[in-house]
Image: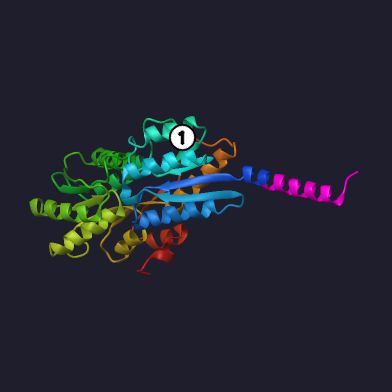
Amino acid sequence: MITKRMLGRLAIAMATAGLMSAAAAETTIAYITNGNTNEGWTLINGGAKKAGQKAGVKFIELAAEKGELSKQLAIVEDMITRKVNAIAIAPVDSAGIAPAINKALAAGIKVVAVDTGITGAKITSYVATDNIKAAMVQGDWAAGQVKDGDTVIYVTGDQGQSTGQERKKGFLDGLNAKRKNVKVVEVATTWDQTMAQNGVETALRANPTAKVIACAWDGGALGAKAALMAAGKKAGDVKIAGFDGSPGGLDMMKQGWQSANAAQMLAKIGQVGVETAIAAAEGKNVDARIDTGSFLVLPSNVDQFAKDSGVAQFMKVK
């Protein structure tokens, strides 16, 4: 004979089982960014967070403090211990992160690289701008602004990351395809704006007739602008080419300081990166390489690009 008490216990057990089943079905995604806080990364991270708000997904957002590889390695190890379903990560170091990523993959965790690739690990997918293609367009533009014998200053990104390597290669390939006899003065940075400013100041003192300063990211372009101002230059005296399509970069263009920008779809990178991680975690097939696109922004189309990309809302110069 089934009593009311037994029925009550059965109901509680069924409800508990239902809650446990729902919890087990929840997809957990870890988004691990690299600790960068510039405008470009604010937009990328915002796109990632938007995708992580999908119903039925537990979204964990973490960052490598001060952009340190050791901190990012520790975060990945923690996510493995917590048995997340997928990791979307913007690596601090493309090769240095590989051991932890291989451990995650061996544990059955899907891994998607966001914006920056990973070397030494067979990841699930890589979501980013085709940096070589976009930088070749930047280099081609720069070639059209100079003559044989002229000097171009190039501000690099971190050469320990695939992003920095690819943008440098693409720029030089694009420049040399059209203009081989140009002096290229390299300013090395690790995506640090102050390093860019100091490096460009030094390069300008040694090469006062430089015609173009091309930069691997818009923070570098902002540093170049500061260096030109310190040298007594005015907007347009030396042409600056940026890379990112960030609010600050496009503001520079509106002010006459930037002449071209190899613009990424910044928010889209983060959003598609996390969407891809979710899809992979749910057992869906995803492409091994996803290009989120790029666009050459010039003063003639800056307003339209800013509107279409969603960057206009963050710009100070309307």
Residue 228 picture location, percent across and down: 17, 60
Tell me the residue that label 1 is attached to: 104
Query: For residue 93, what is the image quadrant?
Result: top left
> Is residue 202 visible in this depiction of the protein?
yes
| Position of the C terminus by quadrant | bottom left
Q: What residue do we see at 38% from left, 53% from top?
A: 41
Query: For residue 234, what is the image quadrant?
Result: bottom left
| Stretch in magenta | 1-19
Q: Which of 115 and 73 lies nearest the eye of the viewer?
A: 73
Q: Within the magenta stretch, is there residue 3?
A: yes
* Residue reaching furthest to the left: 206
**Magenta region's main secondary structure?**
helix
Residue 63 picture location, percent across and down: 39, 50
What kind of element bears circle 1? helix
Three-letter code, disc 1: Ala
Residue 252 picture location, percent across and down: 29, 62
Q: Which of 212 and 163 lies nearest the eye of the viewer?
A: 163
83 sits left or right of 176 in the view: right
Q: What residue do we see at 33% from left, 64% from top?
A: 251
| Position of the N terminus by quadrant | top right
Q: Within the magenta stretch, is there residue 226?
A: no
